[in-house]
């Protein structure tokens, strides 16, 4: 018999880098929530990311809706971190100077 007191665990875990993953996959909560916010259904998300279980996606979306403020704060921090890494890499590996060198080499031939 099904009772209302039954609980369902949220299939989220945090890896060593502090990134929240869904189920037993490498798909992040960022990915699931981002796709959901773009209007994709849980079924469409599972179709795009076949390693996900449909029940895990529904649970993740329910978690997001229940703790939207906290999840949005986490996502904002992840965006800030990603932007900082992107800027650091662009500074370290300046693609414009590489492009200029390759064009100069091609022109010299």
Image (cartoon, grey):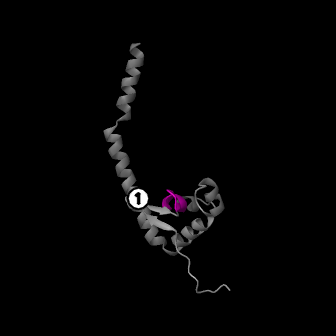
| 96 lies above or below 27 | above
Magenta run includes residue 104: no
Q: Which residues are magenta?
A: 24-33
Side of 32 where 75 appears, left or right: left
> Which is more toward the observer, 2 or 48?
2
> Which is more toward the observer, 35 or 20?
20
Side of 81 where 34 appears, left or right: right
Other-residue count near label 1 (Cα within 10 Å), few / some / many at <14 / 14–19 / ≥20: some
Q: Secondary structure at mark 1?
A: helix
Q: Quadrant of residue 89?
A: top left
Q: Quadrant of residue 36?
A: bottom right
Question: Residue 72, position in %: x, y?
Answer: 45, 66
| 92 lies above or below 3 | above
Question: Residue 76, position in %: x, y?
Answer: 41, 61
Magenta run includes residue 31: yes
| 91 lies above or below 20 | above
Q: Residue furthest right?
A: 1
Q: Quadrant of the C terminus?
A: top left
Q: Quadrant of residue 46?
A: bottom right
- For disc 1, the marked residue is 78
Please state the total of marks drawn on the protein image: 1
Question: Residue 43, position in %: x, y?
Answer: 66, 61
| Residue at image point 52% right, 70% down | 64
Q: Quadrant of the N terminus?
A: bottom right
Question: Residue 4, position in %: x, y?
Answer: 61, 86
| Residue at image point 37% right, 32% down | 96
| Residue at image point 59% right, 55% down | 49
């Amino acid at each position: 018999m099904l009772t209302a007191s039954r609980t369902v665990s949220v299939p989220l875990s945090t890896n060593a880098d502090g990134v929240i993953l869904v189920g037993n996959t490498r798909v992040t909560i960022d990915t699931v929530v981002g796709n959901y916010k773009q209007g994709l259904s849980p079924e469409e998300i599972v179709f795009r990311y076949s390693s996900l279980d449909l029940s895990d996606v529904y649970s993740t979306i329910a978690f997001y809706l229940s703790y939207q403020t906290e999840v949005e704060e986490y996502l904002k921090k992840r965006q800030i971190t990603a932007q900082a890494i992107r800027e650091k890499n662009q500074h370290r590996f300046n693609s414009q100077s590489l492009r200029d060198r390759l064009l100069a080499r091609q022109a010299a031939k």
